[in-house]
Structures are given as C-alpha cells and as structure tokens.
Amino acid sequence: MKKIQMVDLKGQYDNIKEVVNTSIQEVLETTSYINGPKVHQFQKNLEQYLGVKHVIPCANGTDALQIAMMGLGLKPGDEVITADFTFAATVEVIALLQLTPVLVDVNEDDFNINIEAIKKAITPKTKAIVPVHLFGQCANMEAIMEIAKEYGLYVIEDNAQAIGATYTFKNGSKAQAGTIGHVASTSFFPSKNLGCYGDGGAIFTNDDALAHTIRGIVNHGMYERYHHDVVGVNSRLDSIQAAVLDAKLPNLNDYNKARQIAAQKYNKAFEGVTKIVTPKVSNGCETICDTCDCHVFHQYTLRVLGVDRDALVKHLNENGIPCGVYYPIPLHKQKAYADSRYKEADFAVTNQLVKDVISLPMHTELDDEQIEFITSTIKNFING
Ligand SMILES: *Cc1c(COP(=O)(O)O)cnc(C)c1O
C-alpha cells in the first residue's frame, strides 16, 4: 500500500508534471515574474470557469479577505458577523482592520454559519456578514442574501475551501461558490482544492466599481502610476504561481470529482456505524451528487459520538494514518479573539463540534486500498 498522506501533492504533481513544467518554463523564458501574461491568462480563465465578471489575483487567501473588506470601505467599529468554527484567518483580518468581529454559532449537520444566530447578532453597527463555505460546501447563501438585503449588509464569501462547488437556489438556479455575495475571497494554498506551489489567492466580484477599487488596493492604492488615491497594500500573485494554477485549472472539476468519489467510498464504509456521523450535504442535495458539485470535500469530516476522539487520532497516527482536527478550539475561546460580550450558551454547537470532529485523509490520489485500511482501522477501534 502507498503511504497514506493527508494530502498527496507529489502524487498529483507526478500526473501533471509535463504541463506544469512547461507552463513554469514559459515564465522563466519571458522573465515576466510579476504581473506577467500568465497572471492575466489565469485571471481570464478563472473568470470564465466561475462565470464571474472579475477575478483579482492576490498574494494569499488572507490578503484576499482583507482587501475585499478594504474595498467595501468598512470602517473601524463596524461590526462584521462570521462563524465561530473556522480557520482564524477570517476573524484575524476583521480585527486587523479594527472592525469588530462578531462570532456566531454554526449548524451541527453541515458545520456552516447558522442563520438564526446571524439574525440574533445583528445590531445597528452591523455592516457585513462573512460566511465561510466550510470544508467544501456553501453556507445557506439564499437565506444570507435575504438577511443582507433586509438589513443593508455586505456579504463577503470566504471561499478558500469550496472553489468549484455549486450552490442551488430554491428555484433550481445554480451559481458557483464565491459568485453569490457582493465579493468573495479564495486561497490557492497548496493543499486547497485548487492549490499552487507556494502562496496565492484571489478576490471575485461581479461589481465593476468594486473590482476597480480592489485592483488599485492590491497595487499600493495606485490607479495611475505613482498616483496613490487610497491606502493600499502590496499583494500580488506571482507569475510562476499563476503558471501552476493555469496548468491545473482544467483539472479542477476532475479533482473535485475524485474527492467526491473518495467521500462516497468513506460514507459507504461507515454505513450503519452508529457512533459515526458522516458529513451532511446541504443546498438542495441530499447526498453527494453524481451530476452536480454541491460539496467538493476540501475536508472529509466525521463526528464521532461516544468515542474518545483524541484516542482515535492517536490510534490512527500509530497505524500510519494521518488525520486532522479542524478546528480544535472555537475562535471565541482564542486569546486574541475572546470578548466579554460572548456567552457560552450562544456557542453550544461549536463547543461540541471541537470535541467530536475528525478529518480523514482527503485528496485527489486516494486509492481503494488506502480507504479500506483507513475505514477498517477506525471501525476496529470504535467497535473494539
Ligand atoms: C486557507 C484559508 C484561509 C487563508 O488562506 P491563506 O492563503 O492561507 O492565507 C482563509 N479562510 C479559510 C476558511 C481557509 O481555509
């Protein structure tokens, strides 16, 4: 059996070596390392893939979030609602911009931001909602957009984990994750569904004026050379990373499909195991779709009930199976983001999830033998 890895970047690279190497080589030959033609080419191809008017590449997914918030003109003291159960980057940039993060609880079944909790958290100072499409599927965007409309709020989708996922509205129409809110951010960190070989990120929007503002912000606030109209940052996707991404983009749907197939096999292996809750697929899909991409499984995350989760993690590691706990501590309990206004009772779900969740190896190169070994090792532990 091949060594099991949480993500298998080398196995993936071996299968696309020639196109990636050729694409990188083109950059080396032209020496356009910054803002070269490859960056523009990738931007256009991603716009077309997503069906969005503007993609603005930048240096990483955290910058993308920050720049999106700067572009919207959010001001110190503005309240921004986001999920308690996510990677810290989301709340970090809110705090960095001196906006006020307002963390709220998530759903027990799909781990995404809870709609009732959003409503409860809205005050006259609320300016934006940042839903995180956690683990590969969209938050309840239809309800979030309705709330945003009612209260005049911006919606910034943190789409670092769900690129290529589709969202289905109640009327049956579909949209790509990251094209529904006013603006969205994504990350091309190597382990993400579309990853480069270093850091990278992008902002998406259908709003022409906002796109223009953001294009200046990523480039020192310049709209005309050496004229600095707004305070900006230096956040660029470099051409070599764009070359990798442009070579990989045509494979994104196949990569997401490979993840879905692995998830289906995991689900099947855990059928009837009462102490295991397999991931719920929301947004109009009851199960993993063969014909759509409701869930692109950035992570395959189980809940284990009545099982010592940390002992299970240790057991798996001892058997050569890496696994992850995303996330072990709710953001509202992190020293940097604790706030005396928070009440524990408002975070009942997150407080429970951090004890129950375990993410299994999930990538494009998992094979049947590995999945069988992983699932039987888990079942033996739980039943033993
Ligand atoms: C990875 C990730 C980010 C940050 O992306 P970087 O490119 O590492 O800066 C932000 N939000 C979420 C939910 C992520 O998973």
Image (tube, rainbow, N blue to C red):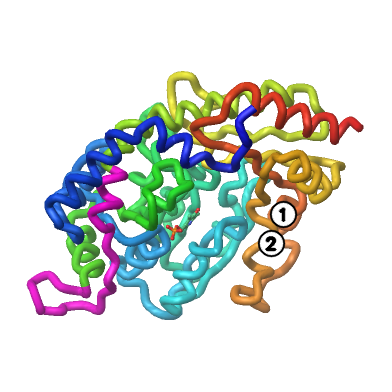
User: Against 15, is 308 above or below?
Assistant: below
| C-alpha gap between disc 2 and disc 1 | 6 Å
Q: Which residues are magenta?
A: 220-245
Position of residue 246 in the picture relative to residue 64 (left or right): left
Magenta span contains residue 221: yes
What secondary structure is found at the residue carrying circle 2?
loop
Is disc 1 surrounded by few (<14), some (14 to 19) or many (20+) residues within 10 Å?
some
Query: Closer to the camera, 164 or 205?
Result: 164
Please count the marks in the image: 2
Q: Quadrant of the N terminus?
A: top right
Of the residues shown, which amino acid type is indicated by label 2?
Ile
Image marks 2 and 1: residues in contact by CB distance under 8 Å: yes
Q: Position of residue 343 (x, y in %)?
A: 71, 69
Of the residues shown, which amino acid type is indicated by label 1?
Val
What secondary structure is found at the residue carrying circle 1?
helix
Can residue 98 be seen in this snapshot? yes
Q: Earlier in the sequence, mark 2 or mark 1?
A: 2
Which residue occupies 48% across, 19% down? 290
- Which residue in the structure is indicated by mark 1? 354
Q: Position of residue 176 (x, y in %)?
A: 36, 38
Q: Position of residue 129 (x, y in %)?
A: 46, 59
- Which residue in the structure is indicated by mark 2? 329
Magenta span contains residue 237: yes
Residue 304 quadrant: top right
Query: Closer to the camera, 145 or 381?
Result: 381
Q: Quadrant of the C terminus?
A: top right
